[in-house]
């Protein structure tokens, strides 16, 4: 009898913290009214099943890369918009070049420590996400703000290390998985 009482007490203590489902497999966006009754519209997320453990590791690595570099791509988008606005306001080419040089050094000082500790996969994903956010490849951004020679130099360096600054974001084919991960990230569905 004492055993059963102890088990019941333990279950009563533990059970309030137990939930049937975690809520990570769907998200609720809106309500629909049908016959005077409010019904939540729930979007069920796809579940990825990988046949090989290697594919699962690649997916998790891609998720980690997106979580690390997506905020940087968002900042790049905002900075680029600010730069374009400011460049339109500056009257002379000399003032524009000085402004670009100043922003370049500011960005370099701020992000060099972060970029030095990135993996190649994270670097590739960052280049793709910068293209996704700004609609310019990294090469086009460099060419626009730093000049064709500098862009060509860094394209050559990136090719030596297996990267490509001219790679474009293709959300329908090549980068479909990255697009899904970004959507989940924006919805707050990634752990």
Image (cartoon, helix red, strand yellow):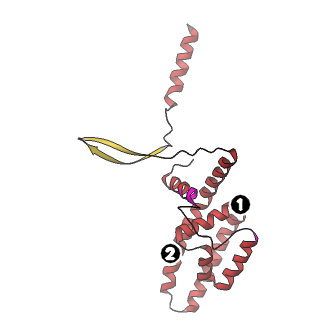
The span from disc 2 to disc 1 (Cα, nearest Å) is: 27 Å
Residue 5 in percent (x, y) is at 54, 12
Task: Report helix, strand or loop for mark 2.
Answer: helix
Residue at x 68% of width, y 45% of height:
52
The quadrant of the rendering that contains the N terminus is top right
Which mark, residue 81?
Answer: 2
Query: Label 1, on which residue?
Result: 119
Task: Report helix, strand or loop for mark 1.
Answer: loop
Against 118, residue 102 (above or below) is below
Which mark, residue 110?
Answer: none
Residue at x 59% of width, y 73% of height:
137
Q: Quadrant of residue 36?
A: top left
Residue at x 51% of width, y 30% of height:
18
Task: Decide which of 143, 95 is in the foreground and name it.
Answer: 143
Residue 14 in percent (x, y) is at 54, 26
Q: Please report whichever mark, 2 or 1, sits nearer to the chain's N-terminal start.
A: 2
Side of 42 where 160 appears, left or right: right
Q: Is residue 43 magenta?
A: no
Residue at x 50% of width, y 75% of height:
81
Give, as a single range, the part of the protein colored magenta.
160-179
Closest to the camera, between mark 2 and mark 1, is 1
Q: Quadrant of residue 168?
A: bottom right
Dot 2 surroundings within 10 Å: few (below 14), some, or many (20 or more)?
few
């Amino acid at each position: 009898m004492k055993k059963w009482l102890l088990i019941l007490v333990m279950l009563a203590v533990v059970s309030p913290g137990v939930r049937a489902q975690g809520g990570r497999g769907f998200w609720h966006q809106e309500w629909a009214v049908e016959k005077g009754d409010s019904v939540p519209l729930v979007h069920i997320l796809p579940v990825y099943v990988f046949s090989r453990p290697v594919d699962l590791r690649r997916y998790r690595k891609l998720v980690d890369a997106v979580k690390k570099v997506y905020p940087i791509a968002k900042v790049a988008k905002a900075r680029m918009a600010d730069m374009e606005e400011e460049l339109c306001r500056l009257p002379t080419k000399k003032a524009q070049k000085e402004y670009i040089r100043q922003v370049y050094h500011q960005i370099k000082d701020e992000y060099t420590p972060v970029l030095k500790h990135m993996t190649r996969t994270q670097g590739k994903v960052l280049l793709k996400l910068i293209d996704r956010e700004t609609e310019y490849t990294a090469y086009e951004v460099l060419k626009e703000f730093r000049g064709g020679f500098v862009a060509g130099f860094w394209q050559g360096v990136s090719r030596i290390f297996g990267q490509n600054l001219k790679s474009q974001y293709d959300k329908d084919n090549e980068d479909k998985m990255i697009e899904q991960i970004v959507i989940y990230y924006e919805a707050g569905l990634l752990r």
